[in-house]
Image (cartoon, helix red, strand yellow):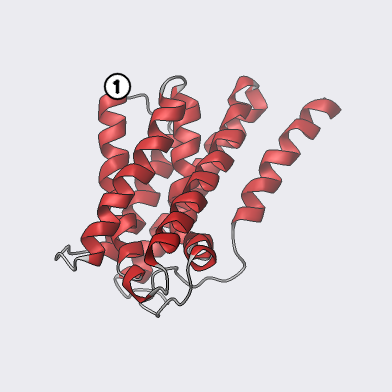
Amino acid sequence: MTSGNSALRLPLALLLAALPLSSALAHTGVGVAGGLTSGFMHPMLGPDHIIAMVAVGLWGAQLGAPAIWVLPITFPLVMAFGGLLGVMNVPLPFIEQGVAVSGIALGLFVFMNVRLPLAIAACIVGVFAIFHGYAHGRELPEAADPVAYAVGFVVATGLLHLVGILIGELIKWPAGAKLVRGCGAAIGCAGVYFLLAAVGVVE
């Protein structure tokens, strides 16, 4: 039992370490100066981005191969497309709400251990990735080095997916499976809060 508890501590610590102490959203519209570092920190400082990206890894782990890799690869690829839309100022409504809903939906999928065909799961992840990418893309033109900035936020996204995958691997043990579903519930609740904040109900 002691070894089992020890196995749970590292992934849980990784999740907690990924969550910033600040409640500020990553895409507040404030200008971002810099390149690789700024791009890397952009998603890391936005809890609404973090929960969705970790949830992608969690859900992929629950679905198993090949989803465990397909979903985390799909998200940043489509996110880059969303970022391009943001750079080009292509009108896309309800960005903040879309980012928040991604946390609610993905958290719910993890909590309920929803098992969908790979193509459908990838499409869902891709749709949410567009909102996240667009939010990043709106900041990208203000970076001193837009290419390095884009590389930074894609790398950060991949690392957050990896955190989710590592935690998701705990499903191999009964207690770990419960922990993963608990993470999904927490992510969903956080998504509800971010949605309420996006529509101005809470601050």
- Is 54 on the left-hand or right-hand side of 92? right
Answer left or right for 139 relative to 34: left
**Quarter placement of the C terminus:** bottom left
Query: Which residue corresponds to the image point at 29% horizontal and 45% vertical from the top-left?
Result: 78
* Nearer to the camera, 27 or 110: 27
Residue 180 pos. (x, y %): 56, 35
Residue 121 visible? yes
Instruction: Tell me how many marks there are.
Output: 1
To which residue does mark 1 refer? Answer: 117
Outermost bottom residue? 30
Front-lying residue, 78 or 188: 78
Residue type beneath disc 1:
Pro
18 is higher (above) or lower (below) than 23: above
Residue 149: % across, % down: 43, 63
- Estimate the x, y position of residue 167 in percent, counting from the top left: 61, 36
Identify the residue shown where x is 27% and y is 38%: 124
Q: Between residues 79 and 59, which one lies in front from this camera angle?
A: 79
Secondary structure under the numbered disc 1 in the rendered image: loop
* Residue 55 picture location, percent across and down: 46, 42
Query: Would you identify the image quadrant in which residue 139 lies?
Result: bottom left
Answer yes or no: is residue 190 visible. no
178 relative to 43 in the view: left or right:
right
Q: Considering only vertical position in the picture, is 178 above or below 91?
A: above
Of the 4 image quadrants, the one containing the N terminus is top right
User: Label 1: few (<14), some or many (≥20) within 10 Å?
Assistant: few
Q: Residue shown at 36%/63% (left/top)?
A: 136
When the figure is inspected, residue 157 is found, relative to residue 181, above or below; the finding is: below
